């Protein structure tokens, strides 16, 4: 019997690629060439499935160019690179990788909160530049994390994991805002209190963004939201670029309307707004919140298992759209 054909759009763990090769005719991209739209469509022509990452956009044009396509398995929990409506109407299954990255991503979110509040990047740059010649009482004095108010915008799995760290590990008062309020038992398990977005902005000492990027969440944090925050507050974004208006954030940081920011994601990444690069009160990391070897391997394996499950047995593990 002919094996189904699969495109693995980016380099992945060799052992996961080998598993896929046992089941499928695989076109790999271990050279990790970044395909443009045309190259992606060309490479995906005739395949039954694609293992995508956040870098590959699956839209109506790609779907039209690949009429035999049955599934796109995203190696990411976020799926704003998918036009889900177009995929559903083309009868193409979409899958993502929830759960396997929750705790790891929350760890990194917390690391960014700490690094931002405690000015770790600034201190390190200062030391490396050879500027450290004495102790001083207020040198890189930052904001308290333990016992302060943690604000969480977006309270899905990762938001809840951040809340648990804040409440149980750092004795923080945790408040959150989300499209829908959590049930009482879940709220109690992460000791978090639902508040309006306005209260969240006004009360948080440290605000972390953990919501999906959609048309609705585009620039959810812009100039007017930043203006409502405490001038001593910090902002951390581990969700998606585009949720924050990066130009407005840079302006607020420059004006002292906000103390500091920790950013793992950027509008138009891998480009970073030059005004952010020019600031010292920002911690900038290259979209690595899920990046531990174990977690990235689990994400790749889950994406592969979704391809195997669906193309060989008719059932994916973590589908995003119902097809029939
Ligand atoms: C991915 C992420 O590594 O899962 C997500 O949504 O942002 C990251 O964990 C990235 O999207 C590449 O696929």
Image: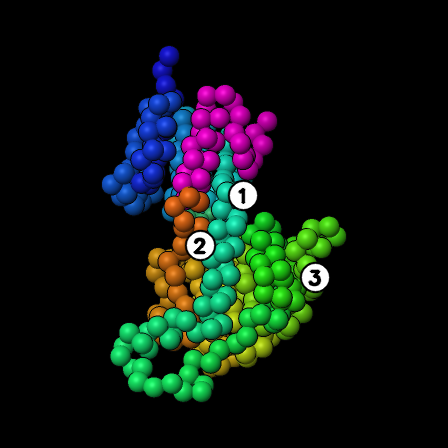
Answer above or below: position of 199 versus 182.
below
* Residue 204 appears in the picture as rendered: no
Residue depicted at x 64% and y 64%: 174
Q: Residues within 10 Å of mark 3 (few under 14, many from 20)?
A: some
Residue 302 in the image, given as x and y percentages of width and height: 46, 35
* Inter-mark Cα distance, 1 to 3: 23 Å
Give the extent of the magenta segment. 296-324
Looking at the rendered structure, the secondary structure element under dot 3 is: strand
Tag 2 residue: 289
Kindly state the secondary structure of the residue where label 1 is placed: loop
Identify the residue at horizontal 64%, vertical 72% (top origin). Answer: 203
Who's the residue at 36% across and 15% down the image? 2
Task: Decide: is 214 above or below 148.
Answer: above
Dot 2 surroundings within 10 Å: few (below 14), some, or many (20 or more)? many
Q: Position of residue 296 (x, y in %)?
A: 41, 44
Whole-Å distance between the Cαs marked 2 and 1?
14 Å
**Is residue 303 inside the magenta stretch?**
yes
* Mark 1, residue position: 99
Quadrant containing the N terminus is top left
């Amino acid at each position: 019997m002919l094996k189904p054909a699969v495109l693995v759009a980016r380099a992945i763990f060799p052992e996961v690629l080998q598993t896929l090769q046992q089941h499928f005719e695989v076109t790999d991209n271990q050279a990790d060439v970044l395909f443009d739209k045309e190259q992606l469509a060309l490479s995906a022509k005739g395949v039954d499935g694609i293992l995508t990452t956040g870098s590959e956009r699956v839209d109506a044009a790609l779907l039209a160019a690949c009429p035999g396509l049955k599934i796109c398995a995203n190696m990411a929990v976020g799926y704003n690179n998918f036009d889900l409506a177009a995929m559903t109407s083309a009868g193409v299954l979409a899958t993502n990788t929830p759960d396997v990255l929750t705790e790891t991503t929350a760890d990194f979110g917390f690391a960014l909160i700490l690094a931002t509040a405690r000015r770790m990047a600034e201190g390190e740059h200062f030391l490396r530049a050879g500027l450290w010649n004495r102790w001083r009482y207020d040198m890189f004095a930052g904001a308290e994390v333990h016992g302060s108010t943690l604000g969480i915008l977006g309270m899905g799995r990762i938001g809840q994991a951040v809340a648990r760290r804040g409440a149980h590990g750092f004795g923080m008062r945790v408040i959150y805002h989300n499209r829908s309020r959590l049930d009482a038992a879940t709220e109690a398990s992460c000791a978090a209190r639902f508040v309006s977005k306005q209260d969240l902005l006004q009360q948080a000492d440290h605000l972390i963004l953990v919501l999906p990027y959609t048309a609705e969440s585009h620039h959810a944090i812009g100039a007017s939201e930043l203006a409502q925050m405490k001038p001593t507050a910090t902002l951390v974004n581990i969700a998606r670029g585009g949720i924050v208006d990066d130009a407005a954030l840079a302006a607020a940081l420059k004006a002292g309307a906000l103390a500091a920011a920790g950013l793992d994601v950027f509008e138009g990444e891998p480009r970073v707004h030059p005004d952010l690069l020019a600031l010292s009160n920002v911690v900038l990391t290259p979209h690595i919140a899920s990046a531990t070897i174990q977690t990235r391997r689990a994400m790749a394996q889950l994406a592969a298992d979704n391809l195997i499950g669906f193309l060989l047995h008719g059932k994916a593990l973590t589908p995003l759209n119902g097809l029939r």
